[in-house]
Image: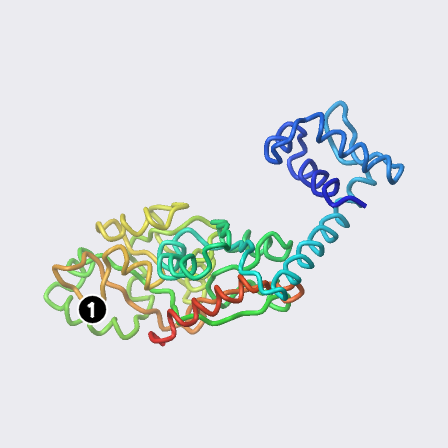
């Protein structure tokens, strides 16, 4: 069996297009078609129906599931032998959310590159749910995310705690001043130790769109406290949402480290335009973790990255 034929088959099956697959693989369509034909001839089956449009046959669908496992095992085999031989080369694929990448990666990745310059790093930035699926499929080595994680994958992955993190409520100074007047500074100091979400239940909310990890946590929290929020904006980009929040448009949910990066603080002052209030609920108290699929070999490149991240944040704990 030829692994190249299998990889080419999987690439065509992924995009369902010989043209697109050929471009990604940097081969001609004729060469790609020959590889697929050789695979079909080897096993005496048709993997694709070419007309009226390209689609997998029953044999093709069965082959795709097994081919993914075979190619993945071959990749793990090569990686493990490379680690045993002491090579410092390799490839590390990391999944991380957009906002988390802005805070976490600048602290870790430059140092990792300095220590392991021959390791090629590939970043996949997406929402945590899709990254979790890619992790289980073997497309990612590790995912950096917030724990508590999705329950569906808890028994399939292993976690390495990196630092404590909590979901917070971000409230513009404007809203604090209008609501509490001369008491706003004292109230902000009080809420900096923990705030009851009901305190701001009547305020306009800026929420990220459904499908985002923060939206899932905030929806759960709002429901638990029987709050029907007045949502004036939903946005897929948390960065934009926090900037609008800080400008006074409404209150928002965000992780402390991200909110601080965009100018929010823990007191009302001239140095910040919004205040960060920790939420008291245990459901949103968690940790930033690095997750890997416990059924797959964890490469030396991934283990070195995890160790470095842990050492970077350990003093803060």
- Quadrant showing the C terminus: bottom left
Secondary element under disc 1, as helix, strand or loop, is helix
Residue 217 vs residue 96, the one in the foreground:
96
Q: Classify 10 Å Cα crowding around label 1: few (below 14), some (14-19), many (20 and above).
A: many
Residue at 43%, 74% (x, y): give it.
Answer: 282
- Which residue is labeled 1 in the image? 188
Task: State the residue in front, 177 or 209.
Answer: 209
The tally of labels here is 1
Q: Is residue 111 left or right of residue 123?
A: left
Is 210 in front, or is 313? 313
In the image, farthest residue toward the top: 52
Q: Is 127 situated above or below 167?
A: above
**Quarter holding residue 16:** top right
Give x and y (percent) for residue 60.
Answer: 79, 40
Judge from the rendering whether residue 116 lies leftward or rightward of residue 246; answer left or right.
Answer: right
In the rendering, at what x and y percent does residue 178 appear? Answer: 16, 58
Q: Is residue 7 above or below residue 36?
A: below
Q: Nearer the viewer, residue 203 or 143?
A: 143
For the point 43% across and 71% down, which residue is it?
Answer: 310
Q: Position of residue 150 (x, y in %)?
A: 55, 62
User: In which quadrant of the rendered view does residue 185 lie?
Assistant: bottom left
In the visual, does 138 lie left or right of 50?
left
Name the residue furthest left.
182
């Amino acid at each position: 069996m030829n692994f190249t034929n299998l990889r080419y088959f999987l690439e065509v099956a992924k995009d369902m297009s010989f043209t697109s697959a050929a471009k990604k693989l940097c081969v001609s369509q004729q060469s790609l078609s020959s590889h697929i034909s050789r695979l079909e001839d080897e096993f005496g089956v048709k993997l694709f129906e070419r007309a009226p449009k390209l689609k997998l046959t029953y044999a093709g669908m069965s082959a795709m599931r097994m081919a993914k496992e075979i190619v993945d095992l071959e990749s793990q085999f090569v990686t493990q032998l490379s680690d045993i031989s002491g090579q410092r080369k390799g490839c590390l694929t990391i999944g991380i959310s957009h906002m988390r990448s802005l805070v976490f990666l600048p602290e870790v990745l430059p140092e990792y590159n300095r220590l392991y310059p021959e390791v090629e790093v590939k970043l996949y930035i997406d929402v945590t749910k899709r990254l979790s699926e890619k992790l289980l499929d073997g497309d990612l080595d590790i995912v950096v995310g917030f724990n508590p994680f999705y329950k569906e994958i808890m028994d399939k992955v292993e976690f390495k705690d990196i630092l404590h993190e909590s979901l917070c409520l971000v409230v513009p100074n404007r809203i604090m001043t209008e609501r509490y007047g001369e008491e706003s500074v004292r109230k902000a100091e009080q809420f900096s130790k923990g705030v009851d979400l009901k305190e701001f239940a009547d305020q306009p909310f800026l929420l990220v769109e459904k499908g985002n990890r923060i939206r899932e946590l905030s929806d759960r929290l709002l429901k638990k406290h029987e709050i029907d929020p007045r949502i004036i904006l939903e946005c897929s980009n948390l960065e934009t949402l926090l900037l609008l929040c800080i400008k006074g448009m409404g209150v928002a949910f965000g992780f402390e480290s991200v909110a601080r990066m965009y100018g929010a603080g823990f007191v009302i002052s001239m140095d910040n335009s919004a205040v960060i209030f920790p939420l008291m609920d245990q459901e949103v108290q968690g940790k930033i973790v690095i997750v890997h699929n416990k059924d797959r070999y964890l490469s030396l490149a991934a283990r070195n990255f995890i160790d470095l991240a842990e050492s970077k944040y350990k003093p803060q704990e």
